[in-house]
Image: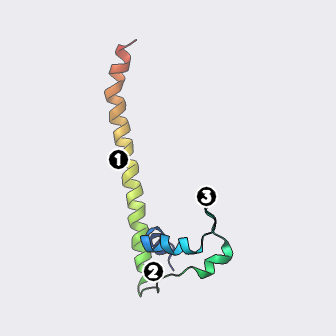
Amino acid sequence: YPAYLLYEYLRSQKGREALGLIQTGTTVRVLPSSQLEQLSLPSCPSGAAALGDSLKLAALRYAADAAALRRNYDEKREALLDPFFASGR
């Protein structure tokens, strides 16, 4: 299973349900490594490696775009607030 494909499956509703079946504990959820073998996964589709690569690329692009948006916001916020804070001195 490509890592990003597995990651997306585990984040999905069906993946969370599958994890819920093998987790133990009520307050603190525990996932025993011995139980991981019992985790039910959908059959790996043909082209799974390419799908995993596409998911990885999309995740990396998202992270880069989010970081750029945050930097842009922080810069504009600072430029707008600097005169305001300076006037209070």
* Position of the C terminus by quadrant: top left
Q: Residues within 10 Å of mark 1 (few under 14, many from 20)?
A: few
| Mark 3 secondary-structure assignment | loop
Residue 7 is left or right of residue 66, and the answer is right
Pointer 3: what residue?
27
Residue 26 position, x and y percent, is: 61, 62
Q: Residues within 10 Å of mark 2 (few under 14, many from 20)?
A: some
* First-in-chain label (3 vs 1): 3
3D distance between C-alphas at marks 3 and 1:
37 Å
User: Measured along the vertical axis of the image, is residue 82 above or below residue 35?
Assistant: above
Give the amino acid at mark 1.
Leu
Q: Nearer the viewer, residue 56 or 18?
A: 18
Hey, which quadrant is residue 25 in on the image?
A: bottom right
Q: Residues within 10 Å of mark 3 (few under 14, many from 20)?
A: few
Residue 15 position, x and y percent, is: 48, 73
Pointer 1: what residue?
69
Residue 59 is left or right of residue 83, and the answer is right
